[in-house]
Image: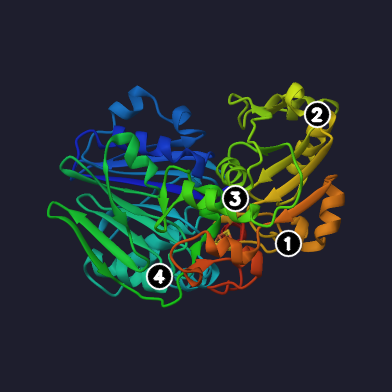
Amino acid sequence: MYEKCGVFGVYGLEGAAEIAYLGLFSLQHRGQESAGIVVSDGRKFREHRGTGLVAEVFSTESLRKLTGHIALGHVRYSTTGSSSPRNVQPFLGECRFGTLAIAHNGNLTNTLTLWRKLAKKGAVFHSATDTELVLHLVAQSVFDNLEDALKEALWQMRGAFSLGVMSARTLFAARDPWGFRPLCLGKLREGYLISSESCAFDVLGAEFIREIEPGEMLVIDENGPRSFFYAYSSRKAFCVFELIYFARPDSVVFGNSVYEARKKMGMLLAQKEDCLADMVVPVLDSGLCAALGFAEASGIPFEFALVRNPYVGRTFIQPSQDLRDLGVRLKLNPMRSLIKGKRIIVIEDSIVRGSTSSQRIATLKAAGAKEVHMRVSSPPHRFPCFYGIDFPTREELLAASMNLEEIRAFLGLDSLRYLTLEGLQQSLVPPENQYCFACFTGEYPVPPEEGTGKLVLEEHVVSRR
Ligand code: SF4
């Protein structure tokens, strides 16, 4: 599973590019395919972008050339459009309001409707991302000032969008009225920052001011930030998966400490535990906080029985099918002396396709575990996401076609239990009706329109050429 993107913006600080670079570094978990930074010194734009990790895309030399006091940065994993360099964000374009840079986290659900409407009016598209649509909507606005034109563009967009938009002199930030994706405001010395997650402020020694509200737009210029609400939805839809899996545990997301929320999920999961086990083992890193909560509430000792090699990243190539098992062990090595003859409860945050889970279970059994039980700190995952998380299709989701017993047998487990939806809701602040649970329930808070989903926009762009 992949998050689509991370957004980071800087206003009013010399060396804005270096600050954005450090911000993007902290948001790397939100997108590993590409990274980009656009800066402005009040008149001229400069940009650097590329495919790869933040540390691979930027060098001291490339950052030195990015002079300016306003910056907008982005890390990306593609859920619409391919990973081609032409889709690397921030998207930069010219319109009657001058040059604009746009960075987007989320997925629009009315992409095709907007695309057709804009194409009919003569828009020519240069990328295969829904982010470019924002630029065209602004350019074709009936309003004559950028602020109102942006507001009009936001009114027309449906689905998930946390946006950073930058003109030569102003930084804008906006969140969709449902609040699917996080976005927050920070302060560093005399300047201001926007970030997908608050953890990026900590590394800079910046102050976390607050989360930007659903339906809110911020305009940050030489007078500081100005806020107003461009739209309102009584139904909020904070993505609960940000709290279960995606966001970093040291972030504050939707008013929750991510660490505390995950620990609470683990504690509630342990409430009805009747399994006699010798140890609780986290699947690093995402199951760690829930495993701590589970161990604390159940009184079963917590052990790091699987040791992760932090240097095996996305570049690791499995040499051949025969060596696949070795590849798994290279990433996660079992501590045999700890595991042999023991009854183990493994804590996972979610089971999607089941392939990774089954490999881990097989690894534990091969290391001599007497019993392997799995507890999952989220409900069964049955439906795809249309709001910016790259889940597999419904057919590939294990829980969409199997019941609990079938999944247990398929994974080779001695027992399996998931956190209930009620348990998940109890782990969260604010109340449950403020969240999106669609990948568990199939109840989509913003119904996806025709054409929502991966690569649809790209197909239309390509077929038009
Ligand atoms: S469907 Fe699931 S992953 Fe997508 S926004 Fe809703 S809760 Fe998040």
Looking at the picture, how far across and down is residue 71, in whole percent? 29, 43
Displayed quadrant of residue 132: bottom left
Looking at the picture, how far across and down is residue 32, in whole percent? 53, 39
In three-dimensional space, the C-alpha distance between marks 2 and 3, rounded to whole angstroms, equals 29 Å
Q: Check contact, mark 1 vs mark 2: CB within 8 A.
A: no
In three-dimensional space, the C-alpha distance between marks 1 and 3, rounded to whole angstroms, equals 26 Å
Q: Please indicate whether residue 240 sits to the left or right of residue 38 in the image.
A: right
Lower position in the chain sequence, tag 1 or tag 3: 3
Looking at the picture, how far across and down is residue 164, in whole percent? 34, 54
Q: Identify residue type, mark 4.
A: Pro
For label 1, being within 8 Å of ligand 1 is answered no
Looking at the picture, how far across and down is residue 239, in whole percent? 51, 60
- The label shown at residue 266 is 3
Q: Identify residue type, mark 2.
A: Asp
Per the image, the residue denoted by label 1 is 394
Rendered residue at 54%/39% (across/down): 33
Rendered residue at 24%/64% (across/down): 146
Lower position in the chain sequence, tag 2 or tag 3: 3
Rendered residue at 50%/47% (across/down): 87
Q: Identify residue type, mark 1.
A: Arg
Number of dots carrying numbers:
4
- Report the front residue among 253 and 458: 253
Front tag of 1 and 2: 2
- The label shown at residue 325 is 2
- The label shown at residue 177 is 4
Secondary structure, mark 1, is helix
In three-dimensional space, the C-alpha distance between marks 2 and 4, rounded to whole angstroms, equals 46 Å
Front tag of 1 and 3: 3
Secondary structure, mark 2, is helix
Secondary structure, mark 3, is helix
